[in-house]
Image (cartoon, rainbow, N blue to C red):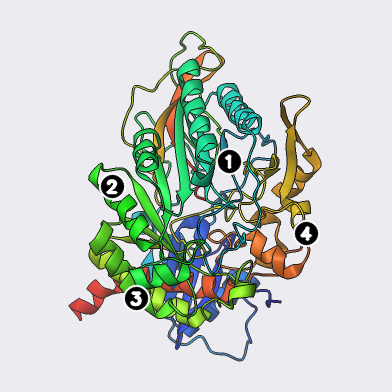
Amino acid sequence: MPSQPATPGDLFVVKSREDRYVLYAPLRRTVAAVNGAAARVVSRYVTEGPASVGPAGAPLIEALEAQGLLAAQTEQAPVFPADYAFNPIEVTLFPTSRCNLRCRYCYADAGRRSIEMPWEVARAAIDLVVTNAGRLGSRKFTVGFHGGGEPTMAWGLMRQAAEYAHQRSEETGLDVELFSATNGLLNKEQREYIAARFSSVTVSLDGPPDVQNFNRPTASGAGSFEGVRQTLEYFNEVRFPFWIRATVTASTVHRMEEAVEYLHAQFAVGELHMEPAWQCGRCATTGEEAPAHQDFARNFGRARAAGRRLGVNVRYSGSRLDVLTSKFCAAPGDGFSVLPEGVATSCFEVTEPDDPRAAIFHYGRFDPQTGGFAFDDERVRALRGLSVEHLPFCGDCFCKWHCAGDCLAKVFGDSGSAEHRGSRRCELNRALTLGAIEELLDAAEQPREGRN
Amino acid sequence: MQDKPNDRPQAQDTGQADVDPKLYAVVNGEKFPRPALETMFAEPEGVAGCSCNPVVYCACNKVRTPVEITTPTPTPTPTAPPRSTFSGGCSCVGHTSCSCEGNSSGGVVTYGCQCAPVH
C-alpha cells in the first residue's frame, strides 16, 4: 500500500466509453485507460488520500505510480516566465484590406474597404524585429504577410518589404524567414518571386474544383480553382514548400475525406489544416453556416485516417495532442501583427479598429513623428493575462494545455467582453482531443489483444 | 455560454464498491506525441523535439533561456551572434521551422534549438 500521497498536479479523469475512463496527466505526457472501478479508486486516492484506498485498489495505485501517472514529481507548465519582456522578433504585415476573392465565409469581409499599408510602416516594423533579434541574441528574424485582404494584392509593397528584409539580413548577419498566407491566385511573376525569396507559404484551398469555386469565388464571381492549381503546380515543380488550409462549411463537411484524397493526388500536399468555418464576417450576408460539431468531428476523423493512409498530416487547430502550450496562438501577449493603418495587433482576426475586440488586441500603432511604433504597455500586460493558466474557465479542463482556451477572438466575440466564458468549439475540441488520446490507447492495447 | 468543464477527480460516493479495478493500457514517454511549443521551459537535457549536439536549451516562441555550459569565446557583436556549427538534429513537431541556434551571454556561446510558433 503506498504510504505517501501523490501530487495530483494536472490529473484529469474523463469518461471515454461504457465503463471505460481515461486518466490523463498532460504535463507528464502520460495517459491510462481504466474501468469505472479503477477511476473511482484513483479519484478517491487523489481527493481523500492513500488511506481511502482499500486492498483491491492498492496494486492499481502502485502501477500508476510506477508509470508516472501518480508519482509525486514537479510538473513544468509551458507558461511564460514572469519576467518575460515584449520584444518581438517576428512581425506579420497586413499590407492591404483589398482582396480579389469574395469567399463566402470570410471573417474579415475582405475587399469591403481599400486601405494600403504605407512603406514607412512596413519598414519600421521590420526594423523593430531586426533590432530585437540582435538585442536578444537570436540568429534570425521573421517577416510574414497575411490578411485582412490578400497580401499579394499590394504586390509592390510586399515585394519591397521582402527585399528590405533580405537587405537587413545581409547587413546584420541574421537569417531571415519570410512566410505568407495567400489565396494562391498569383501571376507568373508573383509565383516565381515567392518561390525564390520566401521560406514557405500557406495557400487557402478548400478542396476539389466545385467546392473551391463555390466557396471562394473571385470578385467578379468566377471560379478560383484553376488559378490556384497553376500556382501549386509551379510550387511543386520548383520544390517550394507550401501547406494548404481548407475551410469547412456545413455544405462541404461531408466532403472532408474526399478533399484530403483529392489534394494529395493533385498537389502531393504534405500538411493540410482543416478548420470549420466560423459564423462571422461575410457569413451574415451569404448565409453560409458552420458545420455542426458532430459532423465536423466525424468527418475530421475520416479525413485524418485518409491522411495517415496517404502520408498527409491533417490537422485542426483546436485539437493538437502534440502541442503543449499556454496559448492557442500568439494573441495573448507576444503576437506582433501590423494592420494597413499601422495599428499593432496581437490577433490576426481582429483587423478593424472599430471592432469592439480592438480594445483587447490592438496595443500600439506606428507613430509618423518618431518613425517607430508606440506600444500600450498596459494592454500588452493585459494580453499576457489571457494565457490559459490565467483563464478560470479552462482551469479544470483536460484540454487546457492543448487548445489553451481556443481562439480568443472567437471567444470574446461571443462573450462581448474580455471574459473567457468558453468557446463554441469547446465540445468539438474536447471530443477530438479525447479521440486522439483514445487512438493512442487503442494502439497500445492492440498487441495485448493479439496475444489473447 | 458553455458549461465550465471539470475533469478533475471528484470525491466519490462511499457507497460505491471498488471491486475489480482494471488498468487496460498506459501510454507515456516516447510513445506519446512530443510537445512542440514552448518546450524551452522543460529541462535543458533531453528537451522534447530538439536534439542539437550539445543540447543546452530550446528556445521556442521567441523567448530564450540559455544555459551557459560551453567554453568562453570572444563576445560577438550584438547583431551578429555566432553561427552554430551544428546544422542538423532539430525537429519541431507540427511546425516547419526549427534550427540550431548560437547565442551569446557574457562572452559565453551556447547552442540549442529554436522552434517557431504556430499561428
Do the residues indicated by labels 4 and 2 lie within the same chain of the protein? yes
Q: Quadrant of residue A282?
A: bottom right
Residue under label 1: A93
Do the residues indicated by labels 4 and 3 lie within the same chain of the protein? yes
4 or 2: tag closer to the N-terminus: 2
Residue found at the very far left of the displayed protein: A451
Helix, strand or loop status at disc 4: loop
Residue under label 2: A234
> Which chain letter matches label 1?
A
Position of residue A160 measured from the top left corner of the image (x, y, whole percent): 51, 30
Position of residue A361 measured from the top left corner of the image (x, y, whole percent): 71, 50
- Residue sitting at 39 percent across and 33 percent down? A197
Density class for disc 1 (Cα within 10 Å; few <14, some 14-19, many ≥20) is: many
> Which chain letter matches label 3?
A
Instruction: State the separation of the CA atoms marked 2 and 3.
Output: 29 Å
Q: In the displayed structure, does residue A393 sit left or right of residue B27? A: right
> Which chain letter matches label 2?
A
Instruction: State the separation of the CA atoms marked 4 and 1.
Output: 21 Å
- Residue sitting at 66 percent across and 60 percent down? A409
2 or 1: tag closer to the N-terminus: 1
Position of residue A141 measured from the top left corner of the image (x, y, whole percent): 51, 31
Helix, strand or loop status at disc 3: helix
Do the residues indicated by labels 1 and 3 lie within the same chain of the protein? yes
Q: In the displayed structure, does residue A314 sit left or right of residue A179? A: left
Q: Say what amino acid the circle numbered 3 marks.
A: Arg
Q: Nearer the viewer, mark 4 or mark 3?
A: 4
Q: Is residue A142 visible?
A: yes
Residue under label 4: A356
Instruction: State the separation of the CA atoms marked 1 and 3.
Output: 36 Å
**Relative to A289, residue A378 above or below:** above
Residue under label 3: A302
